[in-house]
Image: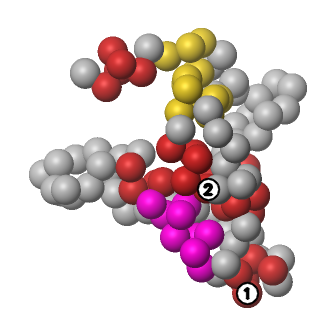
Amino acid sequence: MKILSDAGVSIGMGTDSGASPNRNPGRWQGYFEHVEMEMLVKAGMTPQQVIVASTSAGAKMMGLKGVGSIEKGNWADLLVLNANPLTDIANARQIDSVYIAGRKVNVVAAATH
């Protein structure tokens, strides 16, 4: 991954974990994306490269417009962290709050549904 990333190849983070417990037992969306990000760092990418791969590069590869980066006019989905993921990508698990379309999500209530 490091060789490809350093050579300028766009990397888009992805995982095959899914929301269907019948199709993917023991695989939970959200958790395995964090594992994948940590694996990309272990493979030699910097935390910054992994964050880009997980946000704007992934959106660009999928042909999505208005998502994936913080820019005027883009959809305001944000993850606010309690620790800096640039110093340790595992800090991406230190979630303070989540915003979808600019509105704060009650993550406790969302997790119980």
Residue 41 in picture, x, y percent from top left: 62, 69
Q: Which mark is residue 3?
A: 1
Q: Tell whether 102 sits left or right of 37.
A: right
Q: Looking at the magenta stretch, what is its main secondary structure?
A: helix
Say which label, 1 or 2, has the lower sequence index: 1
Residue lying furthest left: 22
Does the image show residue 62?
A: no
Crowding around mark 2 (Cα neighbors within 10 Å: few <14, some 14 to 19, many 20+) is: many
The residue lying toward the viewer, choosing from 56 and 104, is: 104
Q: Position of residue 40 (x, y in %)?
A: 58, 70
Amino acid carrying mark 1 in the image = Ile
Q: Name the residue located 75 percent from the left edge and 58 percent from the top edge.
A: 48
Q: Is residue 63 above or below residue 38?
A: above
The local crowd at label 1, few if under 14, some if 14 to 19, many if 20 or more residues have their Cα within 10 Å, is few
Q: Nearer the viewer, residue 25 or 66?
A: 25
Amino acid type of the residue tagged 2 in the rendering:
Ile
Among the 4 quarters of the image, the one containing residue 45: bottom right
- Residue corresponding to mark 2: 89
Q: Residue at x 16, y 56 (%)?
A: 25
Q: Magenta segment range?
A: 35-43
Front residue of 66/69: it is 69
Does the CB distance between marks 1 and 2 fall below 8 Å? no
Corner quadrant of residue 111 = top left
Image quarter hosting the C terminus: top left
